[in-house]
Image (cartoon, rainbow, N blue to C red):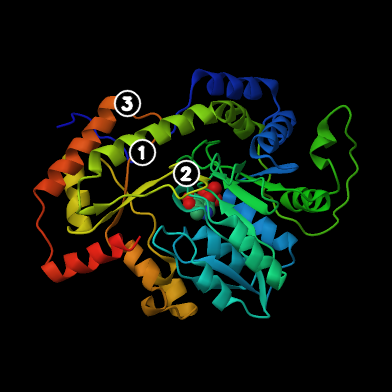
């Protein structure tokens, strides 16, 4: 048994990040400034995008992307039900309707459900690269193009993921990334929007800083001007140089972090592949999964019991996600019923995320493997009918 609790997630922040933050603090430039600009340039290069706009969170990135698209009352935006609330909440903030759609056996937006959900009021589709597994962006683009609807990718989990040889960020859409504390790289809180479109990029910059005219952040520098104009009522979603100081070094370490994530995922797959009581995440063809999450599905034992048993062994776990249609607001206000989302209901049953992050040591990984094997080995089985149903679903993947 471990003597210390293994948290479900921890960021990996090194001396370089600390020194860079200290440098920002000493410089006196603590809000948006030169480091944000550098971070944006380096991030755009990494993601293979023309423009990158640093913002205060992925939630802000999604909200601004929708606002820049003019989405408002009377409009509909398609969102998968298997996501974090932010993906859909931002739609309601603009007075539009989030239209929830079902997911497939990998937890990704079901494209048939997307087609069926499109109406003349649909103004955007927000696919979520769930757990770091890229959605089929080619198939989605074909649907979106047929109906003339823009795609705004929720890539909160997917910085560093690759679809058909190109990084997420390089597929021509507006893309929202997260640098929240648990993400593949972190700035504490923070986000980024990437786009190919220059005029959209400058509109997003403006919306992120009160609607001020260009380069307003420079107004306190020796080259800046005191004069600015408010061109529209924007928001206050800018990133600070303190955050960018963290981001610059996290970005340089990102490939190493991703390699470690993929290596731990490989160890889990090898260690659990003979256990028919759990279904493991897989990497779909033509994609590089970054394993932001490692969501397993328990086929023959109860989730609460499993998480309790992990906790008794000093190991944390989490659940990603409670589908949106199960939350009171979406269930009651938007009248969502579980029967509308059979894929998500199936996916959610027994869903548990195991710890997986670069800071885990080999011993930590071994402890998780031992604990899962022990718990599954001493499981209280479900009635045979329930086991049969869950196994049949897993085999159909
Ligand atoms: C799928 C998804 N979208 C959006 C967000 C929001 O990210 P942020 O916390 O950076 O606003 C999250 C956060 O966990 C997420 O998981």
The image quadrant of residue 277 is bottom left
Residue 48: x percent and y percent? 68, 39
Q: CA distance from mark 1 to mark 2?
A: 10 Å
40 is higher (above) or lower (below) than 83 = above
- Mark 3 within 8 Å of ligand 1, using the beta carbon: no
Q: Is mark 1 in CB contact (under 8 Å) with mark 2?
A: yes
Residue on which disc 3 sits: 361
Q: Residue at x 83, y 52 (%)?
A: 199
Residue placed under numbered mark 2 in the picture = 289
- Residue drawn 63% across and 24% down? 25
Q: Which residue is mark 1?
A: 265
Q: Which mark is residue 179?
A: none
Question: Is the C-beta separation of discs 1 and 3 under 8 Å?
Answer: no
Say whether residue 289 is left or right of residue 374.
right
Numbered marks: total: 3
- Mark sitting earlier along the chain (1/2): 1
Distance between the Cα atoms at labels 2 and 3? Answer: 21 Å
Find numbered disc 1 in the image and state the secondary structure of the residue it sits on. helix
Q: Is 77 on the left or on the right of 280, as rendered?
A: right
Separation of residues labelled 1 and 3 (CA atoms): 13 Å
């Amino acid at each position: 048994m471990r003597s210390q609790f293994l948290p479900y997630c921890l960021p990996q922040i090194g001396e370089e990040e600390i020194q860079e933050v200290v440098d920002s603090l000493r410089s006196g430039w603590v809000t948006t400034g030169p480091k944000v600009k550098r971070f944006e340039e380096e991030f755009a290069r990494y993601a293979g995008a023309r423009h990158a706009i640093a913002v205060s969170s992925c939630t802000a990135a999604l909200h601004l992307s929708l606002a820049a698209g003019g989405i408002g009352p009377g409009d509909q935006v398609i969102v998968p039900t298997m996501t974090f609330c932010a993906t859909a909440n931002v739609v309601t903030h603009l007075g539009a309707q989030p239209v929830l759609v079902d997911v497939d056996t990998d937890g990704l937006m079901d494209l048939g459900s997307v087609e069926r959900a499109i109406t003349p009021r649909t103004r955007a589709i927000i696919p979520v690269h769930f757990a770091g597994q890229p959605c089929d962006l080619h198939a989605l683009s074909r649907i979106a193009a047929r109906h003339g609807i823009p795609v705004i990718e929720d890539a909160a989990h997917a910085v560093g993921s690759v679809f058909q040889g190109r990084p997420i960020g390089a597929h021509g859409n507006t893309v929202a990334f997260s640098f929240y504390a648990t993400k593949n790289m972190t700035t504490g809180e923070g986000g980024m929007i990437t786009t190919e479109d220059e005029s959209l990029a400058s509109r997003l910059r403006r919306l992120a800083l009160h609607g001020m005219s260009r380069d307003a952040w420079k107004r306190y520098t020796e080259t800046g001007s005191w004069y600015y104009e408010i061109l529209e009522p924007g928001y206050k979603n800018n990133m600070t140089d303190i955050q960018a100081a963290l981001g610059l070094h996290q970005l340089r370490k990102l490939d190493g972090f991703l390699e470690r994530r993929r290596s731990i995922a490989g160890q889990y797959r090898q260690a659990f592949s003979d256990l028919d009581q759990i279904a493991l995440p897989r990497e779909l063809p033509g994609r590089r999964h970054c394993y932001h999450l490692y969501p397993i599905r328990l086929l023959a034992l109860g989730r609460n019991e499993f998480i309790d048993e992990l906790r008794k062994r000093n190991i944390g776990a989490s659940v990603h996600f409670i589908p949106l249609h199960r939350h009171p607001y979406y269930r009651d206000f938007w009248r969502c019923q579980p029967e509308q989302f059979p894929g998500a209901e199936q996916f959610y049953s027994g869903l548990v995320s195991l710890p997986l992050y670069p800071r885990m040591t080999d011993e930590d990984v071994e402890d998780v493997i031992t604990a899962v094997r022990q718990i599954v080995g001493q499981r209280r089985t479900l009635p045979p009918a329930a086991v049969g149903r869950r196994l049949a679903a897993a085999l159909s993947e």
